[in-house]
Amino acid sequence: MTDSDKKRFSDWISLIPRRGAGLVVFILIVVIAFSLGLMLSGGDDGQLAQSAVHDHDGEVAKQPTIWTCSMHPQIKLPKPGKCPICFMDLIPLESGSGDGLDPNQLRMTEAAKQLARIETTPVVRDYASAEIRMVGRIAYDETKVAVISARIPGRIDQLYADYTGLRVAKGDHLVKLYSPELLSAQEELIQAKRSVEGLRVRGGVLLSTAITTLDAAREKLSLYGLPKYQIDEIEERGTAAENLTIYAPIGGTVIHKNATEGMYVQTGTDIYTIADLKKLWVLFDAYESDLPWLRIGQTVKFASPSFPGEQFDATISFIDPIVDQKTRTISVRAIADNTGDRLKPDMFVSGVVKSSLDEHGKVADQSDRALVIPASAPLLTGSRAIVYVQVSDDDGPVFEGREVVLGPRAGELYTVKSGLVEGELVVSNGAFKIDSELQIHAKPSMMSPSGGGALPHEHDQSAPMAADMMDPEAVSHIIESPALETLTPVFDAYFEVQMALASDDPVAASESYAKLRGEVSSVDMSLFDGETHMQWMSLSDSIVTYSRKASETKDIDQLRDAFYHVSKAMIDLEEGFGHSDNRDYFLTFCPMARDNRGAYWLQTVDTVYNSFYGAMMLRCGEIKGALPSNPASDK
């Protein structure tokens, strides 16, 4: 600082007032001057800041906060308040963060992805191969089976094939049959032949008639089973043969022998059954889910316990168009070569078909490849299949839920018909973790396509039918009016227990249990007969058992545990018999009861009075349906 600067500073200091009033005035002047300078120099920045605030407010306005319940994530409201189910305070679900994610998307950091052990696999085109295993048995080829039967009545004089299992060749003689009708037919042939020869010189109408008679006699013997050369021999010989010889129409093995020598037979009587065993059928049973992998012409490798370590080949020739109603399987027929006669009919076998599918779910050629994903990737609900796809994002991995249409499963792979394209990354490990996170945030997930959480339920307490699903005829016609009316005190005592527990009054609840037990015991069982008697005995035993235990304690937890079991029986009682008093009963459900396993009970008002939580969460639950009165008919 120069001497001149020091002098100016001293002069400026000398201007500051030394008294109180002057000092105050000076400070006010400085403040006003500073404010004016700030306004003049910083106006543009202020406007920008204010504009930014307005823009931010506008963004928030576009993306309002959504409020949900921590215990019931299916509840989503635009403003804070109470949960309509359990009346707990709502918490903010999401606010306008500007991340640009769709409702079915979830962002994770790389670190979170690694901690959750999320693994992804690309969608590829590959040969979707599978080994279809089937069991079956060997059978005769029905096209290679012949039945030898008698074409005329007679007596069997000789059986040349005298035991089952004998191999015969085509044309071998099998049976010598004596038949009076055959003798008569031969005589007719001989006489017709002589007539033609006698009239051949004269000609005319008589010769024509004789020729017609001769042709008829030949045709008659042909229908009796005589071949043409035998008929010619009879004509040349001029005498009738006493016996008819039956020859084998095919070569094969005698598999059935139904006659003995000296036996009289009628027209159509079966004598032998012969089967050619050089070709056999192999009848496999395939499951319905295996059908996409099978087609006519495929090779089946099969083995039999009779030949350990050996395999045989068969070719599929027929797939039954009808499903067996008892076994729910489809018969698949294959033809196997049995030149060496090693395979025997009725042998048990197990076969394997190696097959591949194309992208359309049909059996593929070697050039066709299907779109496949790991079998661990889809989450299956029964009617839907959900996969989580990793999409590109600069701020970290984003996983998107997507519904796909799956084809048949091929071992550790699933074929995909639609919903994915080649090259996309699907979550192959950890999909349940992503789905659980989406459920927590009430976003669309596997079990909740539209968002929100699914209500849990008690696994050993099946959900009762809603009121609109119950058949009044099925309830009211099986019980007479006196029996139904005697149940009214039982229901009244039960409702006293229900309200006592909702009021957190263990003493009143215990006393009401004792009353309920007494009312059940006083019911006249003679009013029930047949099936209704057995049903009442079962339900009343359950009610009395748990009511007795509850009437001996004042512990509120034990009383509520007994109420769960008693309610199960009372709901079954209502569904089976109905009630006669002129008011509706309301089926009520709390998803949080019994450690979030859920529980049902009955009450007489349409406002929830939670017997499992009392005043702590009196309104937690929902009315599942109204059960109207259905007075029984007087018989």
Image (spheres, rainbow, N blue to C red):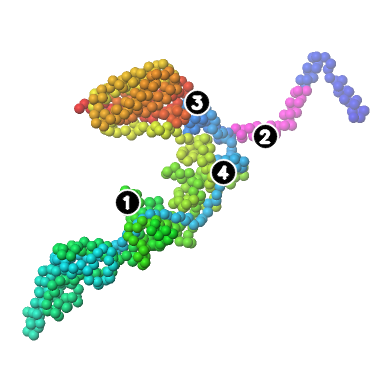
* Residue 324, label in figure: 1
Which residue is the site of mark 2?
48
Query: Mark 1 packing: few (<14 Cα in 10 Å), some, or many (20+)?
Result: few
Foreground of the two, 382 or 49: 382
> For the residues marked 1 and 3, what is the alpha-carbon distance in whole angstroms?
55 Å
Residue 406 placement (x, y as % from top left): 45, 49
Q: Which residue corresponds to the image point at 76% horizontal and 25% vertical from the top-left?
A: 33
Q: Pick whichever, 312 or 476, lies toward us.
A: 312
Would you place residue 495 above or below residue 387 in this image? above
Q: Amino acid at mark 4?
A: Ile
In front here: 175 or 152?
Answer: 175
Position of the N terminus, as image quadrant, is top right
Tag 3: residue type?
A: Met
Nearer the observer, disc 3 or disc 4?
A: 4
> Mark 2 falls on what kind of element?
helix
Q: Position of residue 404 (x, y in %)?
A: 47, 47
Please give the residue where the numbered disc 4 appears in the rendered image.
118
Tag 2: Cα neighbours inside 10 Å, few (<14), some, or many (≥20)? few
Which stretch is magenta? Answer: 30-57
Dot 2 or dot 1: first in sequence order is: 2
Residue at (45% x, 22% y) in the render: 557
In the image, which is nearer the foreground, mark 3 or mark 2? 3
Q: For marks 3 and 2, give the CA distance.
A: 42 Å
Q: Residue at x 49, y 30 (%)?
A: 71
Mark nearer the N terminus (3 vs 4) = 3
For residue 437, above or below residue 173 = above
